[in-house]
């Protein structure tokens, strides 16, 4: 869920920060092979929007990403990236679309964690902003950045844990295979040496 903060009403500033903490959570989607997933936000001129994403599972951990304006002009494009961040300031009113594409892969599905947040532009001439409101606005932006970093760390930690568990499983089964081969070689040697001591009768 995308959260846009409006600073027009001072009594709601504290509640806005609490809402930011509650709603600025990562979204997790699965982008299947040879497909793409697109989302959009309706922005007004001078509104700001930031998109951060991280590929957590699948293939080589890469994804294509792009963001377009209402006239379908590409504002940002990332090719085969595992993580990325892009920020824009809307130059016109309209629908801004961003897509995650896995069309380069024909087999592997990708799990993508992403977060979208923004700030609604308010002209200082239209509404006088008190110093405390400025500080609260700055704090809210800082909290969003911290939340994005936490989500990035969580995804990376999960990926590293999966890699460590996979490595442990491979070591375990490789050890089992070596033990089986060793027992087979020992059994064959015993059988082969035993044949030298067998008494053969010539009729």
Image (cartoon, rainbow, N blue to C red):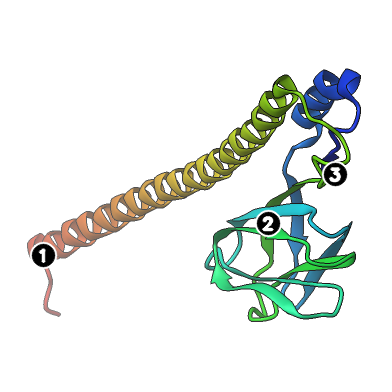
Residue at 84% from the left image edge and 67% from the top image edge? 92
Q: Is residue 30 left or right of residue 11?
A: left
The image quarter in which residue 73 lies: bottom right
Q: What is the quadrant of the C terminus in the image?
A: bottom left
The residue carrying pointer 1 sits among few (fewer than 14), some (14 to 19) or many (20 or more) residues within 10 Å by Cα, namely few
Q: What is the quadrant of the N terminus in the image?
A: top right
Residue at 57% from the left image edge and 67% from the top image edge? 62
How far, Cα to Cα, is label 1 from label 3? 84 Å
Confirm or deny contact between disc 2 and disc 1 (CB under 8 A): no
Percent coordinates x, y for residue 109 in the rendering = 69, 67
How far, Cα to Cα, is label 2 from label 1? 71 Å
Circle 2 or circle 3, nearest the eye: 3
Residue at 11% from the left image edge and 61% from the top image edge? 193
- Which residue lies under the disc numbered 2? 112
The image quarter in which residue 146 lies: top right
Percent coordinates x, y for residue 71 in the rendering = 85, 79
Say which label, 2 or 1, has the lower sequence index: 2
Q: Is residue 150 left or right of residue 133?
A: left
| Residue toward you, 113 or 185 | 113
Say which label, 2 or 3, has the lower sequence index: 3
Residue 77, compared with residue 29, is above or below; it is below
SS assignment at label 3: loop
- Which residue lies under the disc numbered 1? 199
Percent coordinates x, y for residue 164 in the rendering = 43, 44
- Which residue lies under the disc numbered 3? 1
Which numbered circle lies on residue 155?
Answer: none
Confirm or deny contact between disc 1 and disc 3 (CB under 8 A): no
């Amino acid at each position: 869920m995308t959260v846009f903060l409006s600073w027009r009403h001072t009594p709601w500033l504290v509640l806005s920060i609490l809402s930011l903490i509650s709603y600025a959570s990562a979204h997790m989607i699965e982008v299947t092979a040879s497909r793409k997933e697109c989302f959009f936000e309706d922005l007004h001129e001078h509104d700001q929007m930031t998109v951060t994403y991280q590929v957590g599972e699948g293939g080589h951990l890469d994804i294509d990403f792009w963001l377009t304006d209402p006239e379908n002009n590409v504002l940002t494009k990332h090719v085969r990236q595992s993580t990325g961040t892009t920020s824009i300031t809307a130059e016109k009113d309209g629908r801004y679309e961003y897509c995650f594409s896995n069309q380069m892969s024909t087999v592997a599905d990708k799990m993508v964690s992403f977060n979208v947040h923004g700030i609604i532009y308010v002209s200082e001439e239209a509404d006088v902003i008190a110093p405390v409101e400025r500080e609260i606005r700055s704090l809210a932006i800082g909290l969003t950045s911290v939340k994005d970093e936490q989500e990035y760390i969580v995804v990376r930690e999960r990926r590293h844990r999966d890699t460590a568990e996979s490595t442990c499983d491979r070591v375990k089964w490789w050890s089992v295979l070596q033990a089986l081969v060793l027992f087979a070689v020992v059994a064959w040697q015993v059988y082969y040496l035993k044949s030298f001591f067998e008494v053969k009768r010539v009729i």
